[in-house]
Image (spheres, helix red, strand yellow):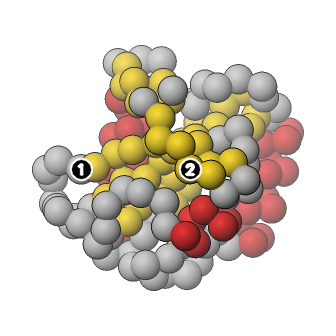
Amino acid sequence: MLKISQELVDQIVAHARRDHPDEACGVIAGPVGSDNPVRFIPMINAARSPTFYEFESGDLLKLYREMGRNDEDPVVIYHSHTATQAYPSRTDIAYASEPNAHYVLVSTRETGTDDGPSEFRSFRIVDGEVTEEEVTIAAGV
């Protein structure tokens, strides 16, 4: 189960809307060994694509070094889908390399850049197997 604050959910959704029609991507870091997402880190989609995302390798290296210095882990890895449901694609599954992370997907297919309901789902992806998990949104986690 992913337990996440409303503030972090709002930041993820806002990032997805800002980058629409391209996929948005980023990380939420938390203390090493915890399952507590705390620090929102929006990234740039180096692919600049409506159907694919990738972290720029230099930015990703910098991020992991920074998390190491801060004793943080990537608790949530998120991205958006702009024309399909919030479910991991074959490519998403193939690239999932953090077995302890929550993989959050947001779909902006219904609203695009506008306000309105969005599809927000979380998954565990381990060894190519996708398991959807419950999301608990709290006022302040």
Q: Which residue is drawn at 59% across and 77% down?
A: 46
Marks 1 and 2 in Cβ contact (< 8 Å): no
Q: Quadrant of residue 82?
A: bottom left
Q: Which residue is drawn at 29% across and 72% down?
A: 83
Percent across and percent down for residue 136 are 39, 24
Percent across and percent down for residue 140 are 42, 17
The tag on residue 118 is 1
Q: Along the horizontal axis of the image, is 106 left or right of 127?
A: left
Percent across and percent down for residue 5 are 42, 26
The tag on residue 70 is none
Q: Which of 129 and 12 is in front in this view?
A: 129
Q: Which of marks 1 and 2 is in front?
A: 2
Q: Name the residue under label 2.
A: 130
The CA distance from mark 1 to mark 2 is 21 Å
Whether residue 92 is visible here, answered yes or no, is yes
Badge 2 crowding class, 10 Å Cα cut-off, few under 14, some 14 to 19, many 20 or more, is some
Q: In which quarter of the image is residue 135?
A: top left
| Kind of residue indicated by mark 1 | Ser
Q: Which of 39 and 22 is in front in this view?
A: 22
